[in-house]
Structure formats: C-alpha cells, structure tokens
Amino acid sequence: MYPRFAQARLEQALADTRVVLLAGPRQAGKTTLARSLADERRAFYNLDNATTLDAASRDPAGFVRNLDHAIIDEVQRAPGLLLAIKESVDADPRPGRFLLTGSANLITLPRVADSLAGRMETVQLLPLAQSEIVSETPPSFLEAAFRGEPPRVARELFGGALIEAVLSGGYPEALVRKAWARRQDWYLEYVDAIVQRDVRDVANVDQLDRMARLLRVLAEHSSQLVNHSDAGARIGLNHVTTQRYTTVFERLFLIRTLPPWHSNALKRLTKTPKLHFLDTGLLAALRGITPERIARDRRVFGPLLETFVFCEVLKLAGWSSERLAFSHYRDKDQNEVDVIIEDRSGRMVGIEVKASATVTSEDFRGLRRLAETNPDQFAIGMVLHDHHRPVPFGDRLWAVPISAMW
C-alpha cells in the first residue's frame, strides 16, 4: 500500500470538524484510505453496494438516525443523505462524526453547498503523486520555494525514466500493469466506465454518447488555452453545451481549468483559462502517446510534461497546511509563466516547464517580467526541466530538475 500524505490533514480535520469530505476521482485510493480509518467506533458504509444504496436512498433520515460516527463511501450516489447528515450534526455537533468520500466535487453542487456550509471541510485526494510512489515522507518542494530557496534534489529522475513516470500516471490499478498496452487499456476502460456510470450522478446530460468523444477532443487541448467553440465544433456541439459538459468532467476530477493571473500593474494580459487533465497516464492513453511515439516525435512530450508538473504541485498543495491559489500568466507579447502559486500573504512562486535538458536565459523571459512587476511578492521563479542538477540564472531564478518536486 502506498503512503498517502493527505492522511495527516484528514485526521486533523476529523479532530475538529463535524463532517469531512475526502474528494477525488474514482480509483484514486479514497476508499482504501477511508477504510483504514474505520474501527468499532466508526462504521463503514459503501454506497456502491446495491443494498446499502437502496436503504440510504429510500429513507435517508432513517439511515442516518442511529449513526454515531460513520464513514459513507461515494456519498454522491445518495444526495438525500446530505440533508439528513446536516440535521444530525446540528443536533450533535461533536467533531469527526461523518467522514464522506465522493468521486464528484460535491461543493460545486448548490444543494450540498447550502446544506453543509460551515459544517464540512474538504480534503482532496488525487491519484498518487510521484513522491508517494518513491518515498515515505512528504517532500519540501513548496516550502523551500516560498522561502526563495531552490529545492534540493533527493532523487534523480530524467530522460527515459522521466518519460515513463509521466506516461504511467498515478492510478494504483494502472501502475500494477507493466505492459504499456495493458496499462493504457485500463485507462480507456476507466473513461468509459466514468462516462456511463458517474456522469448521471452530477448532471443532466442529454447527449451522453458524445461525452467520451468530447473527452478525447479535450485531451488534444490539454495545457492549452480553453477554446470551447473549437473543441465542440469537432463533434457537432455548440460552445455553450461544450462548456457545460466540460464542467461535468471537472466535477468528476478528470480535468481542471487553471485561471489566468490578474494584476492591476500589468496590462494586455490574456484572460482565458488553461485546460489540464488531472492525470497524465489517462491523458497519454486518450492521445495514444507511448514511449515509442515520443522517441519518434519529442514534440508530443512537452504538453504532457506541463500537465504533469501542474498535477504534481496540485498534489503537494493538497496536504500542505497553507491555502494556495493557482493560475497561469500570459500577455499579448507572448511572455508567459505556466503555473503561478500564491499563498495567503500574496507571495508567489512562478514555474515554467520545459521538456528539454537545455535551458537558456530566454526561457526565463516570463518569469523575469513577473518578478519585475512584483518584486516584493516574488519568492522564486523556476524553469523545471529534464535534467538532474539545479543551475542559477540570476536573482531568485533557477533552472531546476523536475525530480526536485519529490
């Protein structure tokens, strides 16, 4: 069993919050982690079980009435439970009464936000981070970055080994399959199952047959600016429907839109979000990218690597004690920074991603622009690339191996 570094944050939340939601995509490890916290005091109920689901759906209040402490897995399958849980924890507000897991972002659903506001904390569990695969201790990448220090490289990973890590993704079930064809078959079957089973739990979709096709089109746009009109036109959907269906995939933790960074000091900024998938193994399978294809055409690796880095820093933030905000920066002069991370005090870390082993001064153009405009808030700017040694490129600017993240 892989260590899950979010467990410490989950246990902290259970110690002082009435309801805790462990949220993330199916097969990311939520059930395994939640079940490890079950004991004689805290019973475990799985709503993927037909009998349990029927009982919870038919009489939510009766189901919850006699529960003192409980874990309810895949709670989005019986949304009526949420009002019953609200009534229960209002009557008995002891912390840690309910641990819920959900494969849909329940907070985006109005009925959930209204019923459990102020009573529930959400802990996100995405597929395995590289640090969870190769280590038993959480990395200090973000902490060092916000101190303005280049992260140390504890484990070298570059070249073919980096390509393998990116294409493998982080779903535990996929990682046990050693052959690339078998691994990518798992991802494609996973997508089909999600579309056929879970989409209906979060949205009323009248063209379900186009959802899988849309996801494949979106895969071609990962790490690019969102363009609903272009994506939808390829499968006969208008931009409004495409945007609505894209939001469904975001609720199911398959994709994430990265908002543009804003500043009153900078004009002519791009105001369009970027699109990223939340697992590069899944993304590679949808795009048919294998090590052999990258060997023939290295250009296909760049967008995957940018998405990989974004996913890794999201996972690091998931168990951080800091509340961090993510965005990207691009202006009309083509200065850009792939990922900007800001803490609550306004300090920022800029990350640019490059698939090459070679970094030049030109690769820091966007980071320099960001630093010049925000000298007091700018902690460090890094070009993360396919190498094994950090190299300084000026004041608070570093070329850093991607493996420094773990």
Image (spheres, rainbow, N blue to C red):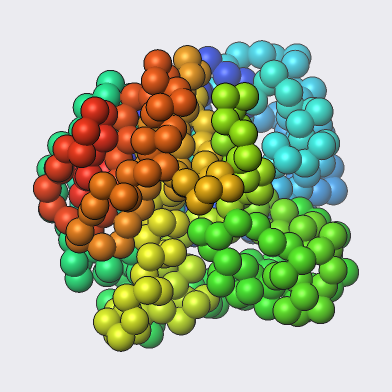
The part of the image, by quadrant, that contains residue 211 is bottom right
Q: Is residue 286 visible?
A: yes
The location of residue 41, given as percent across then percent down, is 50, 28
The location of residue 83, given as percent across then percent down, is 81, 32
Could you say which is closer to the camera, residue 396 or residue 335?
A: 335
Residue sitting at x 33%, y 35%: 381
**Residue 149, placed above or below residue 345:** below
Could you say which is closer to the camera, residue 17 or residue 126?
A: 126
Q: Is residue 84 visible?
A: no
The part of the image, by quadrant, that contains residue 305 is bottom left
Residue sitting at x 73%, y 62%: 228
Could you say which is closer to the camera, residue 298 or residue 285?
A: 298
375 vs 50, left or right, is left
The location of residue 217, given as percent across then percent down, is 63, 74
The location of residue 197, given as percent across then percent down, is 70, 67
The part of the image, by quadrant, that contains residue 296 is bottom left
Residue sitting at x 24%, y 52%: 360
366 vs 2, left or right, is right
180 vs 332, left or right, is left
Q: Quadrant of the C terminus?
A: top left
Q: Looking at the image, how many numbered discs can be counted on the residues?
A: 0
